[in-house]
Structure formats: C-alpha cells, structure tokens
C-alpha cells in the first residue's frame, strides 16, 4: 500500500547555549559590529556548538496506522513531532505528507481566558485547522462530549482546570484530518475522561485516519498503537510491532539516571532546573536499597510571580503503570498562592520498605492548575529499588505489585487446640 | 478498514526552505478563516477587557482632536485649508490613530503569540495581519464619529468621496507593511517594543495630521512626500472635503507602500522559518 507519510533522511540541528542568548538586543548587535566588524559579519554556525536533535530518520507510515513514538527524554520525539507539524523546519531531508495534518501538541492551544466556552470552541477549532462549517456541524457533538453544557457561555477563566481540559479535548477529539499528530497531552485530565479520549482516538483510526502518538505512558502506547518507532539520541533504533519495540525499549533503553538538569530560561514563567535522587545517606545515586528511604530534591525557578502552580512528581514502573503521584501542594495548599520570582528548592521523602523491587521512572511536572499551562513535564530520573531481603524475596522471586510495604500484622491464637 | 484514496502528489512537502523562498500566498488563502477568527478574537477580547469597550475607538481620536483644536486650532491659528480646524484635525486623526494602533499591535503580535507559534502550524503572517485588521474595526467605528462631525459642519460631499475605499486600502496595506516588518524585527530585537511608541510620536509630527502639508515651505515638501502617511492623510481630506488631490504625493505614497510591504514580507519570510526556535 502507498504510504501516507514518507520521511527521508530527516535531520534537525539546534544551536546549543543559553536560550536567552539566541535573541539579542540591538545594542549587542551594534556593539559587536562596532568592535569586531569582520568577525560579526562572518559569524556563522561553525563557531557555535550544535547538536542534532534528530538525524538520518527514514520511515514510512501507511494510512490507518496508529504509530507510537517512544524513547527517553531528549531522544528527539518532540523535535520529530514539531517537524511533522511544521512548527519547526528540518535542517536536512524531506517529509512528504499525503493528507491533511492536525497536530495536538498541547490541549487548548490558543484558548483565550476572557472568551466563553462557545467562543473558544470556534477559536480553538479554527487554530487546529477546522473550517467554520466543520465546527458548526460538530458543535453540538463537541459540547456533549465535553460535558460542560451549562457553562458554555461562561468565560473559560472561571472554569475549573478539569472543565478546561475537557473542553479542549472535546474540540481536539473532533478533528478530522487524515493525519493526527499527538504529543503527550493525555497526561492531564482525569482517568475516566482520558479513557473517553483514547476511545475516541481509536474511532479516529478505524475511520482510516493515521495517528502518530508520543507518550511516556507505555500502557497507553500498548493499548493504542499497532506499531512503534523507538528513537534514541535522535536516531531511529527500532521500528515494528508495538509489543516488540516496547520490549526492546524496556530492556535496553533505560539507563539509570539519578540526576537531571536543564538550563535557566527567563522566557518561561516557571522552569525546572535540577532534580536529584538521594539515598538515605544523602548521596546522589540511582540504586536504592529496599530498606532505605529515598528522597527527591527539586530546584526550580520562577521568572515572574505565578499563582495556582504546583510541582508534581509521578513515579512510573517500566511498563508504564503509574505507581503514585504526589505534589508539593498536597499538604501545603498555601503554595497555590503567589510564588514570587526566585529560585526554589523542595524535597520529598519516600519511606523505606515501601516500593517494590524494580525499575521506576520519575516524571516531574511544573504546571498551573488554574490555566492548565504546563511549564515543564520531563522524564527526569530512572532509578532502581534493589532487593535487600524484601518480604517476598526469600525464595528469590519478586512478588507482584507496585508496592511492597512491610506491614504490621497481628495474629493471635484464639482457640486452644 | 476503509478504502483509502491517497493523492498521487503529496499535499505537503516539508524540507529546509531556500534562503530566498518567500511566503506561499496559497497557504495564506487556505488559512483565511483563521485570519478571521484571530481578528474576531482580538476585537472581542479588547472590547471585553476594557471598561469603556468600543468607546475607546472613538475617545482616542476625539480627545486628540480637542487638544489639537485648543493648542493648534485656536492659539496657533493654523491655516487648515478652509476647513474648520476640528474637522481638519479629526479627518487626519482617524486614519492616523488606525495606523499608530495597527503598527503597535502588529509589531508586538508575533512575540505575544509565542505560545501559539510553538504549538501549531499556520502561515505566521496571519498574526500581524489579524492585529492590523482588528484595528480596522476600530477605525470604522471612529469613522462614524467623523461622519457625524461632517454633518454638523454641513460638509457637502463631492464625487471624490469615491476615492475613500482606495485610501483605506492604502492605509491598511501600509500599516500591514510597517507592522509586519516591526513584528519580525521584534523577534530578534526586543528593543522594538520600546522604540515603537517613541517612533510613532515623532512620526505624528511629520504626517500632516496637525498642520496641512502646504504649511511647509515648498522646497522641503518633497521630504514630506517620502512619508506615505502624509500623502495618505492629505488624500483623506481631499476625498472627504472635495479639495484637490495631491497626485504626486499619493503616487509616491502608493509606490512606497508597495515597496515597504514587499520588503516586510521578504524580511518576515526570512525570520519565519526560525520563529519557533527563537521565541
């Protein structure tokens, strides 16, 4: 069968460095020109260090396929999606698309808080590439799907974050492009609604539509996709039936990482700087004994006063099941108030003898619960709980379950034999 | 599984763009509805967020007219080509306010839409164009006030009024040109945000808004012609009040508008490719 997406020799190069240095002020340019005219004019990419976010990608996708794109952070998944959605240009290579593309890299792109739900359906639909007629035809369906009929004429700034996400998803779920490109957007919203969206997306595929889906949630990938592409270091290292690719990702791709860091950025309201995993002795390491506590340490910055924000951490098992979720606001609701500009450090401790033996990935998210804006959502750490005599491991076999708590049992002999 | 019929030729080809490639007008046409919705959003949000709403469109030129009338009309006794000074000033201020607001809004539009630009594809030129068109709505509202004032002063219309749509188009295109250029510069140099209001203040004084171009000595008048806004604003007065058109000034203004617009589109197109990576 003829392919609907054809990717040939695709590559994208980025310049490394402080993000704020990319755009300059007029003064700097003028100073440069005045000081070293020749060098300023001759300045080109060679001087700066560069990185290939994706390189030498070649693959084809047949119509109607649902393809999952998996890989670790920085593997090039987002860059690939951005190229396919035409947000950024490739440096090399070529992509041919034999159908209309809609991309969903964020829920509620272009939603305006002052406008009503009704207005935002039209605005968002149009931004996602629907025609006015299509929106009008689907309007009632979208409203029914979103379950917010009563608040249709209320500005979305008064919506709860759940309502906001529902409405945004409802619009996106009714897109009818031949090709749908979806980033990790299903991470928000409640579980029941996520399922509803997943089902709706499956309908999309049975209608002959092609879906490209990036997610860290291997569970969702396994449910949805019949084929997977595994990226590593910007290159395609595996492609084939989902089960096989997910398996090879789980066995080979995960390298333990007890630390994560990213550069300071003044253009984001909130930005994660560092995440570290410490053992009970305070040392940064990724092998944690079952019988010791571990703690996550976060450093982040806010470049402007923000409110309604939270730092959330999600711990997943390697098969994509969420072990638990925790947020800094859980026990400290006052953090939902204003966070003044500055650098923040927080720490949370997971008790010893609690998580079962095995590998875990830790996703850290900085988000605004009010507006639904996600500032950061990164798979920051990978760690391992090592067996040091867990209750079930006496015979060397790991007990099933995400948790392996050592619970206090009480047993008394009631009847004399 | 449905039978899928794919086109023989790809609908979209994504590849590194050529350094000299310019915008695809076919693409912009395909996204005309988005242009409408973004304009509609800008207008709606502005009128909703402000207490006075649509009244701002009228108040801004109205108060300027009153101030100009007090300081220039009475005290300086400026020769206003036989037109009552308030009318003379307002006929200049209505298009001027449109131009000033449109280039401010377009100039800041791209940076202000960073969230949209990094998340979804559409021809980026739509962003400054929508900002300009939203200003056009204000312009039409302010124009109603001008018509009222013309009734009050019993201005008799001449056939020259038919030239008005051409002048409005010219103003819109020139605003689009300057605004688009500023928006592209703004991505690279955030100085634009601060320089623009200052530039607009200076520009006002050389745009024949306060004084007619005839008040300038003949030997310097060619210099005024290099400012398309001066020719355009005098054109509005000629069309509205039946004064003689200054054809050379209008001709130069039209030619410069086209040059500025083409250059802006070219400059914008060059920056467009890397927007998402820079913003």
Image: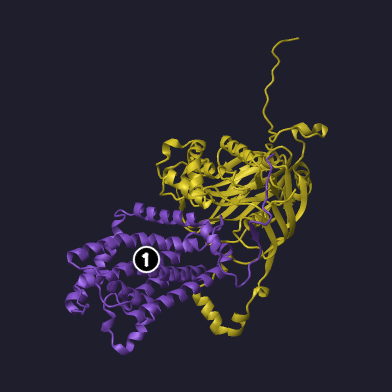
Chain colours: A yellow, B purple
Outermost bottom residue: B219
**Nearer-the-camera pick, A109 or A416:** A109
**Residue for point 44% across, 43% down:** A117
Query: Relative to B116, is B255 on the left or the right?
Result: left
Q: Relative to A278, is B185 on the left or the right?
A: left
Instruction: Residue under label 1, please give it.
Output: B101
Q: Is residue B100 above or below residue B223?
A: above
Task: Give whichever of A22, B186 is nearer the camera.
Answer: B186
A323 on left or right of B272:
right
Place of residue B40 in the rendered image (x, y in percent of width and height, measured from the top left): 41, 54
Residue at image point 65% right, 61% down? B14
Image coords of residue A276 (percent x, y): 65, 52
Which residue is depicted at the point 27% across and 83% down?
B214
Q: Is residue A147 above or below residue A123?
A: above
Q: Position of residue A145 (x, y in %)?
A: 52, 37
Q: Secondary structure at mark 1?
A: helix
- Judge by depth and name the residue closer to the eye, B217 or A235: B217
Using residue B64 as the reference point, say whether residue A164 is left or right of it: right
Return the residue found at the far front: B159
Quadrant for the C terminus of chain A in the image? top right
Q: Quadrant of residue B53?
A: bottom left
């Amino acid at each position: 069968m003829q392919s609907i997406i054809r990717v040939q020799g695709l590559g994208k190069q980025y310049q490394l460095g402080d993000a704020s240095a990319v755009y300059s002020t007029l003064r700097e340019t003028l100073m440069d020109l005045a000081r070293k005219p020749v060098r300023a004019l001759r300045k080109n990419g060679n001087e700066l260090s560069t990185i290939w976010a994706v390189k030498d990608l070649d693959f084809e996708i047949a119509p109607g396929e649902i393809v999952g794109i998996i890989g670790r952070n920085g593997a090039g998944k987002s860059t690939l999606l951005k190229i396919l959605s035409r947000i950024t240009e490739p440096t090399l290579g070529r992509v041919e698309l034999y159908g209309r593309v809609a991309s969903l890299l964020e829920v509620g792109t272009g939603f305006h808080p002052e406008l009503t739900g009704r207005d935002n359906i039209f605005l968002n639909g149009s931004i996602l590439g629907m025609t006015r007629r299509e929106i009008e035809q689907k309007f009632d369906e979208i409203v029914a799907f979103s379950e917010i009929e009563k608040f249709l004429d209320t500005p979305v700034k008064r919506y709860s974050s759940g309502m906001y996400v529902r409405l945004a998803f409802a619009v996106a779920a009714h897109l009818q492009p031949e090709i749908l490109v979806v980033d990790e957007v299903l991470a928000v919203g409640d579980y029941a609604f996520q399922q509803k969206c997943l089902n709706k997306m499956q309908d999309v595929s049975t209608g002959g539509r092609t879906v490209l889906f990036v997610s860290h949630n291997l569970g969702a990938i396994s449910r949805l996709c019949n084929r997977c592409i595994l990226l590593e270091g910007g290159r395609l290292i595996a492609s084939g039936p989902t089960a096989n690719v997910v398996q090879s990702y789980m066995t080979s791709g995960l390298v333990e990482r007890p630390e994560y860091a990213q550069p300071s950025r003044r253009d984001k309201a909130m930005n994660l700087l560092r995440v570290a995993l410490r053992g009970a002795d305070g040392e940064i390491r990724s092998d944690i004994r079952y019988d010791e506590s571990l703690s996550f340490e976060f450093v982040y910055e806010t470049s402007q006063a923000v409110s309604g924000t939270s730092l959330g951490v999600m711990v997943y098992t390697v098969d994509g099941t969420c072990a638990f979720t925790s947020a800094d606001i859980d026990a400290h609701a006052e953090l939902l108030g204003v966070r003044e500009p500055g650098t923040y450090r927080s720490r949370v401790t997971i008790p010893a003898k609690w998580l079962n033996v095995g590998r875990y990935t830790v996703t850290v998210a900085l988000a605004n619960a009010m507006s639904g804006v996600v500032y950061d959502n990164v798979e920051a750490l990978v760690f391992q709980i090592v067996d040091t005599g867990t209750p079930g491991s006496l015979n060397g076999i790991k007990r099933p379950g995400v948790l392996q708590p050592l619970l206090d049992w009480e047993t008394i002999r009631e009847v004399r034999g | 599984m449905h039978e899928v019929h794919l086109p023989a030729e790809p609908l979209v080809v994504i590849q590194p763009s050529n350094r000299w490639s310019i915008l695809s007008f076919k693409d912009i046409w395909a996204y005309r509805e988005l242009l409408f919705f973004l304009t509609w959003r800008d207008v709606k949000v502005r009128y909703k967020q402000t207490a006075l709403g649509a009244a701002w469109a009228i108040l801004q030129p109205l108060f300027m007219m009153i101030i100009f009338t007090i300081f220039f009309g009475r005290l300086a006794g400026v020769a206003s080509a036989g037109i009552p000074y308030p009318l003379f000033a307002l006929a200049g201020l209505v298009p001027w306010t449109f131009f000033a607001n449109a280039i401010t809004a377009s100039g800041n539009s791209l940076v202000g839409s960073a969230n949209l630009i990094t998340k979804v594809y559409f021809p980026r030129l739509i962003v400054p164009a929508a900002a300009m068109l939203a200003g056009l709505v204000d312009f039409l509202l302010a124009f109603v006030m001008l018509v009222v004032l013309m009734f009050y002063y019993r201005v008799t219309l001449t056939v020259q009024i038919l030239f008005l749509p051409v002048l409005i188009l010219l103003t819109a295109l020139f605003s689009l040109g300057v605004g688009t250029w500023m928006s592209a510069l703004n991505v690279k140099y955030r100085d634009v945000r601060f320089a623009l209001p200052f530039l607009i203040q200076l520009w006002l004084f050389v745009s024949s808004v306060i004084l007619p171009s005839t008040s300038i000595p003949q030997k310097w008048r060619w210099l005024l012609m290099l400012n398309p806004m001066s020719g355009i604003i005098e054109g509005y007065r000629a069309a509205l009040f039946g004064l003689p058109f200054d054809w050379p000034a209008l001709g130069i203004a039209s030619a410069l508008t086209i040059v500025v617009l083409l250059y802006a589109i070219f400059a914008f197109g060059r920056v467009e490719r890397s927007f998402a990576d820079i913003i």
